[in-house]
Amino acid sequence: MPTFADLEPISFDAIAGFAHDRLGEAFEAFLRSAALIAAGVPAQRQGLAADSALVAACCAALKLAKSSRSEAGARAFFTTWFRPFKLAGRGLATAYYEPFAEASLAPDAEFRVPVLARPHDLVTLNEAPICDEEGRLATSARRRADGKLEPYPDRRAIEDDEGFEQRRAIAYVRDRVELFLMQVQGSARLRLRDGSVAALTYDGRNGRPYASIGRLLVERGLMSAGAMSLAALKAKIRAMGLAPGAPGRLLMQENRSYVFFRIDDSAERRLGPIGGAGCALTPWRSIAVDRSLWPYGLPFWIATRIAWRGDEETTFERLMIAQDTGSAILGRARADLFCGAGEGAGNVAGRVRHAADFIVLLPCVDGGGT
């Protein structure tokens, strides 16, 4: 478990809003992580390992769930098995969502942009990243026929290789904006022509650095921060052009990271998109964290003001569970809040980039003692 010298121990009574939060919801989300951690199931995206104290807390949660799932029981669980520590200073909270997209399993005149499966030669490098051509660390690589590793092609190179795209396609969407947003969010649900739905789950990335194109648009004076929204972002990129060499296409390619998917019809996936921990995410209870600093399953109290229940910013004070990660989620006091699925959730997510107070709940070393 991480230890930081500037963590300030506080009491649960000192956490504003804690007494009023519906901890039963947080407990249900925690149970999804607990089942994996207690069973020793490897995470979908490997992160900092859970220590014995967190494993013990997970086992206790699973035992409690068999006899009681009451609000009082959930509150007693968190206050018994964890101790709160306030992170120094203020952190940053953003939000993300699960997109819906119209799609086809075969290409046609309307659906021509391929959604790609994980390539067979892609190797994920968690412990020993290699350097790319510019000397930056790459967390994935291509294994050559001779067994040696080399940096995987970036977004532009993959998109320019039409043969590669067609060989790895598992579905097709209307344009590259839809695909791009699916990749940034890390999951999607595809509405197919016959009315059925195919769920996509993250299945690796090329290991190249991530860049926020929304931030690039603002920095270059092409959009104002106040005008930024999901709809406005889509419209702007499409207006800039999506053909090879067009400004909109080139802008997206400045995000060199490229995400691959698999079609996922598992029971867990039907509960929601699968986070890096390997379990389904819960809207407004699951967060993405820096997996190199925090283990999956840790509860965090996050306090800020965001427009999450309407157009006006209101108080957000909730216990959240670390169940995901992301290339842009770096640092101790940094969280991406999962806010649900569909365009409405996307519009909410696009408005969240706010300073926030972070309190981490660390498991008791003595296994639930005082």
Image (cartoon, rainbow, N blue to C red):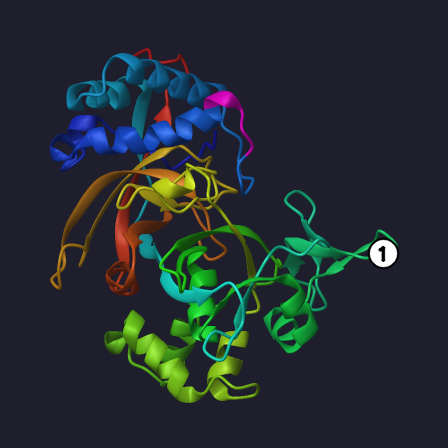
Residue at (53% x, 41% y) in the render = 44
Left or right relative to 261: residue 101: left
Residue at (49% x, 87% y) in the render = 247
Residue 302 lies in quadrant: top left
Q: Position of residue 192 (x, y in %)?
A: 41, 62
Q: Identify the element where label 1 is drawn.
A: loop
Q: Position of residue 128 (x, y in %)?
A: 70, 46
Main secondary structure of the magenta stretch: loop
Residue 195 lies in quadrant: bottom left
Residue at (19% x, 55% y) in the render = 308
Q: Residues within 10 Å of mark 1 (few under 14, many from 20)?
A: few
**Circle 1 residue:** 145
Q: Position of residue 196 (x, y in %)?
A: 38, 55
Q: Position of residue 33 (x, y in %)?
A: 41, 31
Left or right relative to 167: residue 3: left
334 w.r.t. 50: above or below: below
Front-most of residues 264 and 160:
264
325 w.r.t. 310: above or below: above
Left or right relative to 20: residue 171: right
Query: Does residue 13 appear in this view?
Result: yes
Task: Check if residue 166 falls in the magenta segment.
Answer: no
Q: Which residues are magenta?
A: 38-42
